[in-house]
Image (tube, helix red, strand yellow):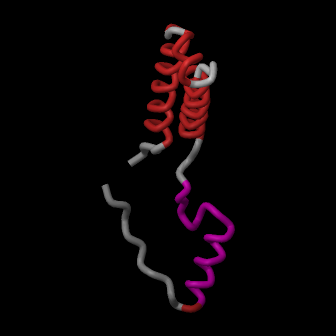
Amino acid sequence: MGLDIRLPIGLMFAILGALLIFYGLVSDKAIYDRFSLGVNINLAWGVVMLIFGVAMYIFGRRGTSAMRSAEQSAEGRLIEEIEHATGEERERRPPAH
């Protein structure tokens, strides 16, 4: 399956961050003076969550799978040669559909 977990996590954090930013912008400023020492905590954490979500989404879109076949890397080819020379090579199974 080709779904990278960073995509839905990134979207979730971005959407929740945007909601917090919106709520921080439209809410009553007196609430923050009374309960959070004048800091608009919804706006601050909304920005943090939005940035994190966008970063996760971007990394998920441009990232590739960490698993590669042995033939695609120099180390993998070397290990395949060693296993073939020592007789430890296993049969190749066709990929499951």
Residue found 51% across the figure and 8% down from its top: 28
Percent across and percent down for residue 75 are 66, 70
Instruction: Say if 15 sits above or below 92 in the image.
Output: above
**Which residue appears at 47% of the width and 30% of the height?**
11
Residue 95 percent across, percent down from the top left: 37, 61
- For the C terminus, the image quarter is bottom left
Q: Is residue 59 magenta?
A: no
Q: Name the residue nearer the viewer: 68 or 59.
A: 59
Q: Is residue 73 above or below residue 79?
A: above
Q: Is 75 one of the magenta-colored residues?
A: yes
The vertical placement of 77 against 68, above or below, is: below
The image quarter in which residue 84 lies: bottom right
Foreground: 41 or 60?
41
Residue located farthest toward the right when viewing the structure as drawn:
74
Q: Which range is magenta?
A: 66-85
**For the stretch drawn in magenta, what is the main secondary structure?**
helix
- The front one of 23 and 83 is 23
